[in-house]
Amino acid sequence: NFYVRSTKTPSTNFAEAYKWYKLAVANGSLDARKAYLLNNEENFIKQYPYCISQGRALIGDAYFVGNGGLAKDTTKAIEWYDKAYSIDHISPVEVGMAKAYIANGDNKKALIYAKEAITQPYAPAFVVMAQLTNDKIEKYTYLSIAVSLFKSPELKFWSQFNEYCLPDLSENGIDDAKKQLSAISLDDSQKEQVEKMTKNIESHWKTEATIS
């Protein structure tokens, strides 16, 4: 119940609450079955599809890394990412899907989801895109955007979403992105290409929340 209480520690997060209720049910909790969030899931999907989508993606994450009492299982992770994706195409869902397919050795399919993920200003999406390219200029561009977003999230964009369903906009992952970025050297001409590519990507970030 921690994530559905209006307290500062931890902050209210319905996606996190959904994840833990679902995991509790899977582990046999009768109390979790009575949770308002689960018993009104369809209403939540209609009003806040991105909340439930992220909640399902968090379950996918749990299977992907093997936490929350779950054994690591990439197949199960993809099943939950699919369930999340069927509701809403918010970037964290697509990032999870891309990482799972990378783990399965299917970079072609991972790239499809990663390209969708960077249509929103979500730092981890650009880290994944950098992983999927061997082009030095592209890699530098994606990593530099990632570092920038880790430092200064596009809060104006994310303010379109319910404040209790925001994705993780912390700096978790910035050190690795910086390390990768520092290993790439570019000349002035290449830096100009990075600047153009960055502006092009930023111009395509959607200005409205995707709640299909």
Image: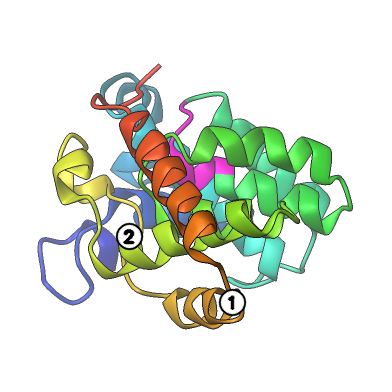
Tell me: 19 left or right of 204. Answer: right
- Kindly identify the amino acid type of the residue bearing the numbered disc 2: Leu
Callout 2–callout 1 Cβ contact below 8 Å: no
- Looking at the image, residue 160 sits to the left or right of residue 85; the answer is left
Which of the two residues, 77 or 26, is positioned nearer the viewer here? 77
**What residue is shown with label 1?**
180
- Is residue 85 covered in magenta? no
Secondary structure under tag 1 reads helix
The correct choice, above or below, for 211 with respect to 27 in the image is above
Residue 148 percent location from the top left of the image: 32, 64
Residue 211 x, y percent position in the rendering: 35, 22
- For the residue pair 10 and 212, the one nearer the viewer reads as 212
Instruction: Please report the bounds of the magenta region as a residue range.
Output: 88-94
Label 2 belongs to which residue? 149
Q: Quadrant of the N terminus?
A: bottom left
Q: Which mark is residue 60?
A: none
The reply, left or right, for residue 103 in relation to residue 156 is right
Whole-percent x, y for residue 127 in the image: 55, 60
Q: Which numbered disc flags the more N-terminal residue, 2 or 1?
A: 2
